[in-house]
Amino acid sequence: MMALLMALNAFGIDAILPALDELAVDLGVDGNARQFVIGVYLLTAGIGSLVPGALADRFGRRPILLGAIAVYILLSVLSALAPTYDMLIAVRAAQGFFAAGIIALPPAIIRDRVGGDKMARMMSLIFVIFLMVPAVAPSIGEAILLVADWRAIFGVMAVMGLFVGAWVHFRLPESLSPENRQPIIPRTIAVNMTRALALPSVVGYVFGSALVFGALFGFINSSQQLITETFSAGDIFPMIFGICAGSMALASWSNSRIVERFGARRVSHTALFVFIAVAAAQVFFAFQPEESLWVFVPLMAINMALLGFIGSNFGAIAMNPFFAIAGAASSVHGFIRMTTAALLGGAIGYAFDGTARPLALALLASGIICLVLVLLSEKGKLFGPSDAEAGMGRG
């Protein structure tokens, strides 16, 4: 259930990718501006993440989550009906903002039940299902385009929202215990959110993951143009995107099998070093006279797989100290990650120059800066023990 909640957003982003050319022609959009259909949603989802966590800490997870799903459904329908590109962008911006609870609340619901490396394992299992959606969403979007136009993709988003919303309504119990409910007092909310970012051991993981996922968002924003224009492989775009996204799903499954044994820190720190090495290889090949698609795709798939070992583990490490204020912590962490990643990803996508160079350079730079931030959080000591070994586990 948590995976499909998060996958609603993934489907809303990735299913429309094969339709960007058709959408651009239909609504009169030029050049890289078509990417804003994706970028504006990611940005406002990050900004909106500040809101639902505080409300969920007061009123419970269920009502806020159901409200977010309802808005997602409504604005999916309005996206399908948008008469102009400016109207579509406005609706997508609103959809990202008001449906941010779909992104922010699943980690809080999970943290209500488990913590530490167990949370990392559960998040990894969720990410397996969640990441299968980006792997197949472009193919679904392509199939929809065979029988309808790009507007039908948003209609399918609304139908998916109805299905998941019904499941949540009938099957999700409230996970917030009465003693952990927080009052809606601006000062209290501000204090809780400040606490969620105040620990030096946490802040590096939040900002570090924002940077590496910003580079990933840069790939998502520019992927349709990159594969279609740079590598002249538009006819197999869904397959290529599916390979890259599927590698993340496979890595998340693998992470769920090993993280409790080796610990979230050991696994994610190792993955980060390999990420930097692969990004360096991407830079090297991107600056060759004619980079091959079959060089680009394996390297991109490997780095996306490494994000499967980084993302859920970084998130679990950052959330672990905040059992009593999990909603506020999830919101502020989501705000930092999503807004930073969306702005960075939008900049990378808009810098598309017909080559893979902007993306490759961004991947390498984000990995190096992320490593520096993690070193600061860990006071220079990497590959720390698991929570169980450190005696910090919570059942």
Image: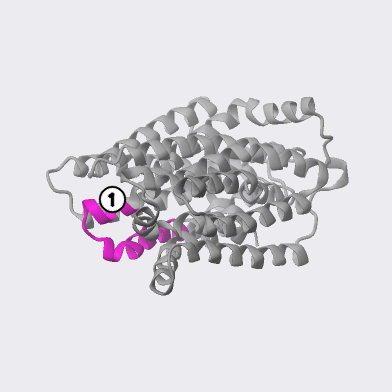
The magenta stretch spans residue 248: yes
Mark 1: which secondary structure? helix
Q: Provide the residue designation for mark 1.
A: 226
Q: Which residues are magenta?
A: 224-250
Q: Residue furthest right?
A: 178
Which residue appears farthest toward the bottom when viewing the image?
147
The image shows residue 349 at horizontal and vertical percentages of 36, 42
Q: Which quadrant: the N terminus?
A: bottom right
Q: Is residue 212 visible?
A: yes
The image shows residue 194 at horizontal and vertical percentages of 68, 26
Residue 241 location, x and y as percent? 36, 59
Judging depth in this view, the residue of 4 and 304 nearest the camera is 4
- From the image, give the main secondary structure of the stretch colored magenta: helix
Q: Is residue 316 magenta?
A: no
Q: Residue at x 40, y 41 (%)?
A: 215
Q: Looking at the image, which residue is at 41% across and 49% down?
A: 306
Q: Is residue 53 above or below residue 377?
A: below
Give the side of residue 332 with respect to residue 370, left or right.
right
| Horizontal arrangement in the rendering, residue 236 relative to residue 72 (left or right) | left
Q: Number of marks in the image?
A: 1
Given the image, on which type of amino acid does mark 1 rest? Leu
Is 332 placed above or below 141 here? above
**Observer-nearest of 303 and 190:** 190
In the displayed orientation, state which residue is furthest to the left.
289
- Left or right of 4 on screen, residue 305: left
